[in-house]
Amino acid sequence: MKTAVYSLMIMTVILTISCKNEKPAPVEEKKTEVKISKDQIDETIRKVKEIYTDEQAFRIEKGVNQVAALWKESDGDAQAFETFCIDNFIADSAGLLVAYNKLERNFEILFGYFNTMTVSLMEPLHLDMGDIHFVDNIMGAYSASSHLTEDLFANKLAFYVALNFPSYSLKEKSENADKWTRLDWAYARMGDVFISRVPADLLQSASTATTNADTYIADYNIFMGNLVDSKQNTFFPKDMVLITHWGLRDELKSNYNSEGGLEKQKMIYNVMLRIISQEIPQEVINNGDYQWDPIANKMYKDGKETSFTPEPYTRYEHLLHTFKTLSAMDPYNPVYPTYIERAYDQSMELTQKEVEALFTEFMTSPEIAEVAKLIKSRLGRDLEPFDIWYDGFKARNSLNEDELTVATQRKYPTPEAFEKDIPRMLYDLGWTRDKATYIANKISVDPARGAGHAWGAQMKGDVSHLRTRVGEKGMDYKGYNIACHEMGHNVEQTLTLYDMDYYMLCGVPNTAFTEAVAFLFQSNDLKLLGKANPSNKEESDALAALDNCWSAYEIMGVSLVDMYVWQWMYKNPDADPKELKEAVEKIAIEVWNKYYYPVFGVKDSPILAIYSHMITSPLYLANYPVGHLIEFQIEQYVQDKKFADEITRMLLQGKVIPQQWMKGAVGREISGEPTLTAVQKALKIIR
Ligand SMILES: [Zn+2]
């Protein structure tokens, strides 16, 4: 359900080479040559300064340094560099505005049409257009824009932008946030476009490393029917095969109310521990030939114990390789010189320090221990480490899903029927009839092959796409529920493109925000269907608060482990996979003992290290808990206000930094307090 995001940064060529090799290839050491010397930079700055007033000193220094950091030998010699800077620096504000407007127009054309091309080329893959042909696959994977960035360096436009629109670090943006005008923000976003120039071979090896890690996890299945206890008893269906860690975790969650559930949960927990420690027999991964007792760690063939080879730290070899390929790009990223800074400061636009503080404050709040007590009494037993996945706070829907499906199928027999109804839905959510029609006219509803997604336009004049599955009998309730979520994305995409004051400010700060808005629309689905039941609202709100709190607590710990492991790898770049494994276990246990042991009463569990994201999506995990908090804050804020007015007002802030967006949206920065306050209330209602 991710929206398609498009920007120059991600349009950089990333060649994905799918490789089935389990062993990562070694990374070549790569040295960077300094192209323009410090003396030459200083000399150029002096010469440009001679021409203009002192007022321009800051921009001149920043701009010239930025151009120098991006300049390669092939762009010209030191003299060419100096001449370029002297000839192209713009000192007067009127001239700068003209340049901005022209650049903005050109970027909208480039991003807009490239996006339209991609959407159209991928249609045979995304829409139900018959059998997928060889040509469809080739052209669906083809990226027409992949050479754009290099082209813009070659024709010097990238240097022109870098020289005149300085890039600001997150720290500088935060310091200036309160005094910057909308135009200042637009200039700052223009300055973000060209801040690195990573060689294509490095991008390619990083992409290969993550693809290999992905393949490793995708093929990491456990044959559940082959798990046995010391008496050779089996517990799971013969044909059950689960992927680490999502499949294992979801099965663990589903056993909270089943007979013998606790035994099964303990078994799954031990499988997870063996994966983390790599004591798992290599022979039982993705293979159903043996029986395995994960508690005693013994393997059997036809009931007879047999010897095995433990997995040779492959999990950590992938993580190390990803670290090496991503940190190899450090010298080409002058503004954010480590991958940790690129993941936090650049992508999330929150510093690692502030994310850490946000999480640890939340995790040590007294409400967490209260919720744990409640879970303990609901379970009627002491807590086990795997109860971080306690699943008992889901509101039971009093409405039968089949009945809802009858209603949605009748209402929406085709995608067109849903499209036609969008103006009415937006009107019901509080937009005026005119505005509802205006937004709806820019959304096209298409029949999807898969579950559905929303794909925004990148230029005015184009439409955004709502992709949803409509069966032969019409749209079922699940499809309708997802369609409401995607419609939220489309409304956001439309308002932040068409009604935005500056093109460079289109969008929202990061994916957590776009998802928060989409979930708000999704949670109105029954109301829009005329089936809302306000009588159990108090209870379902209370359960939602408890659920939000417990799942945020769980994934915050996982995110801290991810964060500390990356810090460790930067401190120990020459570590081998075994050393990394030991460090990951140590870090996971430290986080556990600090933030979970006081609540659970169980010491030394490394369970927080099981997440597959750690291996496949480097440093992405922190986005989830931040998203949980943002979503809850916005939801609480709008609940007694006019939905359409508030959402529109929030969205039109555009792509400023997250903390500034939140201050403008709800009056305060990202915080766990609204969740915790709601939890206090919920604890009085739910027993
Ligand atoms: Zn979504």
Image (spheres, grey):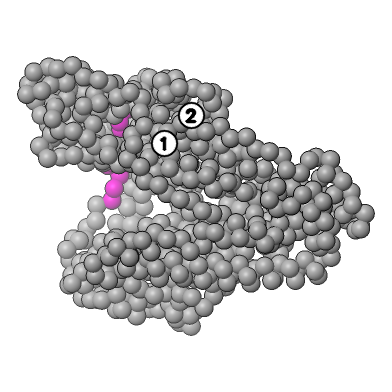
Q: Which of 277 and 81 is in front in this view?
A: 81
Q: Marks 1 and 2: CB-CB under 8 Å?
A: yes
Identified at 65% across, 50% down, the residue is: 195
The front one of 51 and 593 is: 51
Q: Is the CB of the residue bearing disc 1 within 8 angstroms of ligand 1? A: no
- Tell me the kind of residue under disc 1: Met
The residue carrying mark 2 is 565
Give the class, few, some or many, for how many residues have Cα within 10 Å of label 2's Cα (few <14, many ≥20).
many
Q: Which residue carries the number 1 mark?
A: 614
**If you read the primary sequence from the N terminus, does the residue marked by circle 1 or circle 2 appear first?**
2
Q: Image point 86% across, 52% down: which residue? A: 57
Q: Residue 221 carries which label?
A: none
Q: What residue type is labelled 2?
A: Val
Vertical order, 401 against 385 (above or below): below
**Magenta span of residues:** 384-395
Residue farthest along the left direction in this orientation: 302
Kindly state the secondary structure of the residue where label 2 is placed: helix
Instruction: Please indicate, yes or no, whether residue 374 appears anywhere in the rendered image.
Output: no
The local secondary structure at tag 1 comes to helix
In the picture, measured across the screen, residue 134 lies left or right of residue 433, that is left
